[in-house]
Each structure stands twice: as structure tokens, then as C-alpha cells.
Image: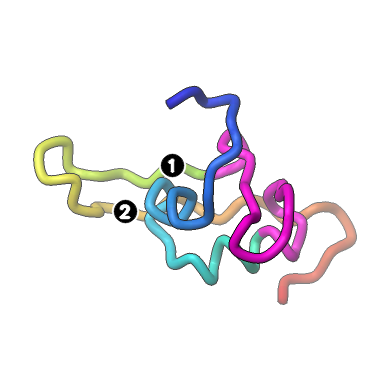
Amino acid sequence: MSLSTWVKGDEAAYYCGRPIGTIWRWASEGRIRRSGVGRGARYWLPDLPHALRDETTRELIQPGAAPALPDGVKAA
């Protein structure tokens, strides 16, 4: 997978090791870029923090850190 691409919500959630609701919230807060709306929305992969996973089992070891909020924005 190219790191300069848009990904679906479930793919973004797996990549970050976070629930899909967290991805939606990050996008609504402006922490990550989103293209589209609803289930058709896509998220900019370079904006997403990568989760640490076991190389063999792919089990989540540590979720990716939350991206920083844009200046002047309060968390939801």
C-alpha cells in the first residue's frame, strides 16, 4: 500500500489500532484529512499514526498516538 493514498474508515482504524469512531472524531476535529462523507469517506494515510503490531500474529501491541489538534481548536 502506498503511503500517499486515501483509505477507507475500517482500513484507517486498523492501521491506527483505534476504533472507527475515533477516526471519525479525529476527522471532525481536523486532526486528519477526510475526503467525502458517510461510509464513502476516505482518510489521508500520511495523517494517520501507525499502530505497533506483532509481526507474526498482527496482534495490537500499542495503538498509534493521537494526532495533534490544529491551532485554536478544542477537542470534542
The picture places residue 60, in percent across and down from the top left corner, at 25, 54
Q: Is residue 31 above or below residue 3?
A: below
The residue most toward the bottom is 76
* Number of on-image labels: 2
Q: Is residue 53 above or below residue 2?
A: below
Q: Indicate left or right for 68 with 39 as reference.
A: right
Which x, y percent locates residue 2?
Answer: 49, 23
Q: Quadrant of residue 74?
A: bottom right
Instruction: Tell me the magenta residue range.
Output: 27-48
- Please, which residue is most extreme toward the right here? 72
Residue 30 part of the magenta segment: yes
Residue situated in front as seen by the camera: 43 or 47: 43
Q: Which residue corresponds to the image point at 54% horizontal and 42% vertical from the top-left?
A: 7
Q: Where does label 2 land, which residue?
A: 62
Q: Which quadrant of the structure image shows residue 6?
A: top right
Disc 1 marks which amino acid?
His
- Figure quadrant of the N terminus: top left
Residue lying at 44% horizontally and 56% vertically, measured from the top left: 10
Amino acid type, mark 2: Gln
Judging by the rendered image, the residue that carries numbered circle 1 is 50
Q: Does 3 sit left or right of 52 as displayed?
A: right
